Amino acid sequence: MIIRYSIYLLLFCIFLYIFTRWFERSNIWMPRANFLATPEVVGLEYQDVLFDAEDGKRLHGWYVPCQTPIACLLFCHGNGGNISYRTESLRQFNSLNLNVFIFDYRGYGKSKGWLTEQGTYKDAQAAYQWLKTQEPSLPLYIFGRSLGANIAADLAAKVNAAGLIYESGFNSVQDLGEELFPFLPVRWITKYKYNALDKIKRINMPLMVIHSPDDEIAPFHHSKKAFDAAIEPKQFRQIAGGHNDGFLLSEKEYLKELSTFINKNLTSFE
């Protein structure tokens, strides 16, 4: 009888572990393989780019140049869909005279490989190196939205750039999980960290934090805490709207603030 119960307990523990890993992965990453559109839908020309991460994973992105660029922007997107879900953002950045490189993490869109936290960091580093080589004479900004903000923060702690634009991020998977599931020992059972708060303390470049108090996914106070932890120079800009539409609902003011930040820090990049 004791042996039988021990087997049942072991099977339950195995099931719980597998379920926890599946639940965690399915909520952190929501990749899509199929493309909804290309930048042509918003009137932009683009170049398909294939490049390799440090560990050999073949990645895909779009390089979207503008007519009279003042800088380049590396776009780290959020956890859902793929690069084809971000055409409106490409339109916005193009209107600011930015050459934009948006890429898919491994497992998203046409990018190959199995998703891991460290893998997404490597993907961002490879995209940064590609863009830096493509346009070495132009200032380079790092932009991240939602999960992409956490990935961008990791990159910004390791490389040189004219500035980091950190939009609608969260402090860490553990911090967010504890707020969503206060009855669970989140820090014991989570595998992935995405600890942006730890990274942002070590960023040595101009920082712009953008968030909306109406955000229903990434709590507004996470960005406030991250901003307080960051060193100068830094600025915080509050927008209106939800997690996935604030940059559109607040577009006029949003683009004005971005333009001011970008133009102010054009000489920061060496």
Image: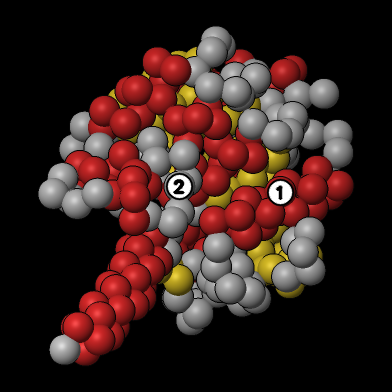
Q: Return the residue found at the far left.
A: 183
Quarter of the rendering containing residue 237: top left
Q: Mark 2: which secondary structure?
A: loop
Which colouring convention does the figure follow?
Answer: secondary structure
Counting from the top left corner in percent of width and height, residue 181 is at 18, 50
Counting from the top left corner in percent of width and height, residue 97 is at 63, 38
Q: Nearer the viewer, residue 210 or 259?
A: 210
Residue 91 shows up from this direction? no
Quarter of the rendering containing residue 31: bottom left
Looking at the picture, which amino acid does disc 2 mark? Lys
Counting from the top left corner in percent of width and height, residue 189 is at 34, 56
Q: Nearer the viewer, mark 2 or mark 1?
A: 2
Which circle's residue, 2 or 1, is located before the other in the chain? 1
Q: Nearer the viewer, residue 200 or 137?
A: 200
Location of mark 1 (residue): 125
How crowded is the residue under tag 1: few (<14 C-alpha within 10 Å), some, or many (20+)? many
Location of mark 2 (residue): 193
Residue name at image x 28 percent, y 49 percent: 186
> Can you say which quadrant of the picture contains the C terminus?
top right
In this picture, is 47 found above or below 234? below
Counting from the top left corner in percent of width and height, residue 20 is at 31, 67
Q: Nearer the viewer, residue 259 or 25?
A: 25
Looking at the picture, which amino acid does disc 1 mark? Gln
Q: Return the residue found at the far front.
A: 2
Residue name at image x 45 percent, y 75 percent: 32
Residue name at image x 40 percent, y 15 percent: 228
